Amino acid sequence: MMPFSAEPDYYSIVIGVLAGVLARFYLLRVDYRQYPSYPHGYISHLFLGLVAAGLGAVAIPALLKKDYVAVTFLALAAQQFREIRSMERETLMQLDRTELVPRGSDYIEGIARVFEARNYIVMGVALVVSATVHFSQPVYGVVVALVAIFAASWMIPGELVGDIARVELAEIEFQGPLMVIGGVVMMNVGLIQHREKILKEGLGAVIHPNDDNARATLDNIGQRQAIMHVAASLLGTKREISEQEFSPLARKHIDTGCLSIFLLPNEPDRELLPIAIRRTPLLESSKRKPLSTQVGRKAAD
């Protein structure tokens, strides 16, 4: 029997598994803004990443030895990874009940999809690296592993609000008890002391969509909720459960499609609000492209 170090399959499997686990660890760091950094959550996802990497790494050696049972295991793994989406959705739904500014169901569904997809990416990284080592040299496998991890990290982040819209600060005004930002009536604030606090500490911004596709995307209520959640998470909010006047708001200008945003933050720096809004991810469920259709193009003319 050949020693462990001399067996080519062991090289391909071990290096493939290591590359997959490293990819999952790196992608887990990317989740920092979207998911709580609970130690037990990290352990669960790293272990699932190890399983996905193992399945991807053994696929090529198994198929070359005509062990077609490996295909069955890949199918079973895909079914198990679909359960991850349900697990993350249920967990985040429970956590969302305790948020002062909830993520919203659309944002949660997007996060759950991403966690499912990242296990497939890990499996793919392990498979590619394992195949490279098997058919060439281990040193090439290391190079391919680095390239694959970089490519996976480049693919995952997706588009941000700043990619489809221009964000600028706007002054908060009161017309009697009505709070107005960018020509949009936000809400009725009855107490004078609340109006004074909002004028002194509140922040307003207007999101200008770049085109009709962006306007249709920003019309989505789930996307608006995600913007408010990210802004409140990064800047803090002085909202209390019983004080609705301090709640973050997003309202649309019905003629232009611009969104007016209100936030009463813990951080008083005015320049941070547009930055926080620009960094909000675009939700897959909110993306609309009416300009890609003949009817949408004619309507825009």
Image (cartoon, helix red, strand yellow):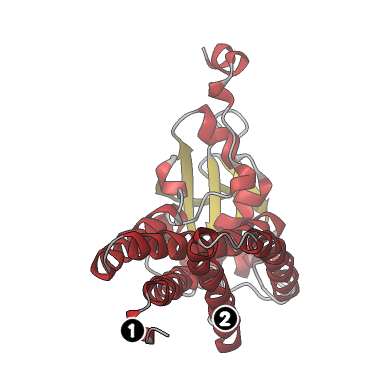
Q: Quadrant of residue 3?
A: bottom left
- Whether label 1 touches label 2, CB < 8 Å: no
User: Is 216 located above or below residue 266 in the figure?
Assistant: above
Q: Quadrant of residue 146?
A: bottom left
Of residues 6 and 33, which is closer to you in this image? 6
Q: Which residue lies at the image location 45% right of the left edge and 48% below the top edge?
A: 159
| Secondary element type, mark 2 | helix
Left or right of residue 153: residue 215: right
Q: Quadrant of residue 81?
A: bottom right
Instruction: State the residue in front, 187 or 286.
Output: 286
Q: Position of residue 112 (x, y in %)?
A: 64, 62
Residue drawn where x is 37% and y is 75% of the image? 11
Q: Is residue 130 left or right of residue 258?
A: left
Q: Evaluate whether residue 201 shows in this view.
A: yes
Of the pair 300 and 208, the residue shown nearer to us: 300
Residue at 38%, 77% (x, y): give it.
Answer: 7
Q: Residue 245: image x %, image y %?
A: 67, 64
- Marks 1 and 2 sit apart, C-alpha to C-alpha, by 26 Å
For label 1, the SS is helix
Q: Position of residue 96 (x, y in %)?
A: 70, 71
Decide: few, some or many residues near mark 1? Use Cα within 10 Å; few <14, some 14-19, many ≥20: few
Label 1: which residue? 5
Q: Amino acid at mark 1?
A: Ser
- Which one is earlier in the sequence, the residue at label 1 or at label 2? 1
The amino acid type of the residue labelled 2 equals: Phe
Task: Mark yes or no: residue 191 visible.
Answer: no
Give me the disc on residue 47.
Answer: 2
Quadrant including the N terminus: bottom left
Judge left or right: residue 206 versus residue 72: left
Q: Tell me which residue sits at (31%, 65%) in the image.
A: 141
